[in-house]
Image (tube, grey):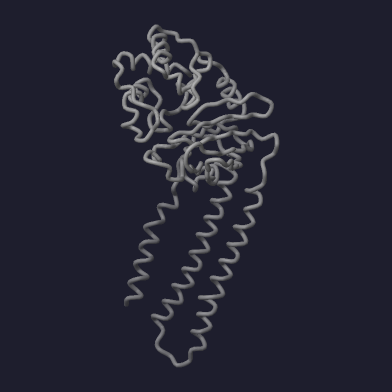
Amino acid sequence: MQTLRCMRRAATYLLRSLPLLGCGGRQSALDPAGEHAETQAALFWWMTGGVVLIWLVVMGLALYAAWTPARTDLTGPRRLIVWGGVIVPTAVLTVLLVYGLSMLEPMLAPAAPSSLRVAVTGEQFWWRVRYQPPGASPVELANEIRLPVGDEVEFLLDSRDVIHSFWIPALGGKMDMIPGRQTRLRLVPTRVGEYRGVCAEYCGSSHAFMSFAVVVQERADFERWLSSQREPVPTPTTQLAERGRGLVLSNGCGACHTLRGTTADGRLGPDLTHVGGRLGLGAGLLPNQAADFERWLSETTRRKPGVHMPSFGMLPPEDVGAIATYLKGLE
């Protein structure tokens, strides 16, 4: 009876877990949108099938043992144990091992010299992104990555402080970012859409608030976007935005941030040249609207503990509003 209760409980847990197999969305490794992610998802399903097969064989043996009367001739039961408990699991695991190892070579192959290269540096707690397209000048931005669909991309990964881990579940596997060492990750996105990347290695108090948006576009759209990112900051079109520009430059923001086309040329923090056109603020912490800029500027350390940027809550609300309006206009 104890055996039957355990088997019934195991079957219940298995049935309850079945809805998880339908997981999807922009941060799901089971909804692949890249060549490597598709390979890894296929391996997952094959391994799941192998596990289910072994489980069925072992549970079959347990049922046979529980429901078969005691017998003196043990030749048959021993044969079942050898086949079901040793030979079948060993054969299934060996096939899965060979299948998994066969996937490594294409995934670890070096990128072609003509591939787009994107250097990403992990910092507490944001991402510095530098595009290095072949035959063109580099472009720097932060906390957002856009890629052309169907093209091979090589990520050059490093860290300025502690170990981070770069992971876009829908596009491929993760890769550690180690201080003083450059690691490489090759991905090929296969489906247009918006996805979510994360830091997969605990890196400090705001590790959970360190994500980035990944947008896969048609090549023509990607080229237009990349060309626009090379442009300097746009000229303010309203008096409020012009006032915000002056406040940004007079309150020391340029000591940490770069605004190409102005005197702000800091390198400690993210490049803000086109910050208003990004999908979020604070490495995915907030949406990207003027009111969100105000919240970020006034409550930086409260919203993101351990971040190196100070809060500017000491400024009058009208000054914070003018700065937010100016930054939102940098698209």
Q: Residue at x 39, y 56 (%)?
A: 17
Q: Is residue 90 visible?
A: yes
Q: Please say if 194 is above or below 93.
A: above
Picture quarter containing residue 321? top left
* Outermost residue, top side: 239
**Relative side of 112 to 63, left or right:** right
Q: Please say if 331 is above or below 33.
A: above
x, y (%) of residue 224? Answer: 59, 22
**Relative side of 203 to 109, left or right:** left
| Front-most of residues 27 and 71 | 27
Q: Quadrant of the N terminus?
A: bottom left
Picture quarter containing residue 202? top left
| Front-most of residues 61 and 294 | 294
x, y (%) of residue 315? Answer: 31, 17
Q: Residue at x 41, y 77 (%)?
A: 63
**Relative side of 280 to 32, left or right:** left
Q: Residue at x 32, y 72 (%)?
A: 5
Q: Residue at x 42, y 18 (%)?
A: 327
